[in-house]
Amino acid sequence: QVQLQESGGGLVQAGGSLTLSCAASGRTFSSYAMGWFRQAPGKEREFVATINWSGRSTDYADSLKGRFTISRDNAKNTVYLRMNSLKPEDTAVYYCAARGTYDHSASGDDYNYWGQGTQVTVSS
């Protein structure tokens, strides 16, 4: 069982940056691949980024490559999402998720545990 708690969301101006954190409970964090997803009002949840158990392999939504960076610190049971050059269309609730395998995945259906989400609002 893994419990996830996101933090770091807020209001930022377009062009600004934010770093989201997701703290996980449990002693087996390093055996989980992790992912970030987001959901904007009136839209379906979409994939943002994912990272494997070691942090050596990552994947991103094509539209976000170059602006967003996912990383993890297994010693701190935490995964991060650094977001640069934010745009109003990045406004959404951001969720972190844990997958009970070593390999990352871009499909939300592959994740077993989800956080409650953190709101990111980008003003123009």
Image (tube, rainbow, N blue to C red):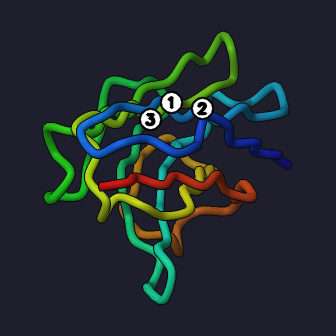
Residue 99 appears anywhere in the view: no
Horizontal arrangement in the rendering, residue 3 relative to residue 50 (left or right): right
Q: Quadrant of residue 94?
A: bottom right
Q: Amino acid at mark 1?
A: Tyr
Total marks in image: 3
The residue labelled by disc 1 is 80
The residues bearing labels 3 and 1 have C-alpha atoms spaced at a distance of: 4 Å
Q: Amino acid at mark 3?
A: Leu
Q: Are marks 2 and 1 in contact (CB under 8 Å)?
A: yes
Instruction: Tell me: residue 25, above or below residue 54.
Output: below
Q: Where is residue 48 shown, x and y percent of the image?
A: 36, 56
Q: Amino acid at mark 2?
A: Ser
Report the disc number at residue 21. 2
Q: Are marks 3 and 1 in contact (CB under 8 Å)?
A: yes
Horizontal arrangement in the rendering, residue 54 relative to residue 3 (left or right): left
* Residue closest to the eye, 3 or 63: 63
Q: Where is residue 75 shown, x and y percent of the image?
A: 66, 10
Q: Earlier in the sequence, mark 3 or mark 2?
A: 2
The residue labelled by disc 3 is 81
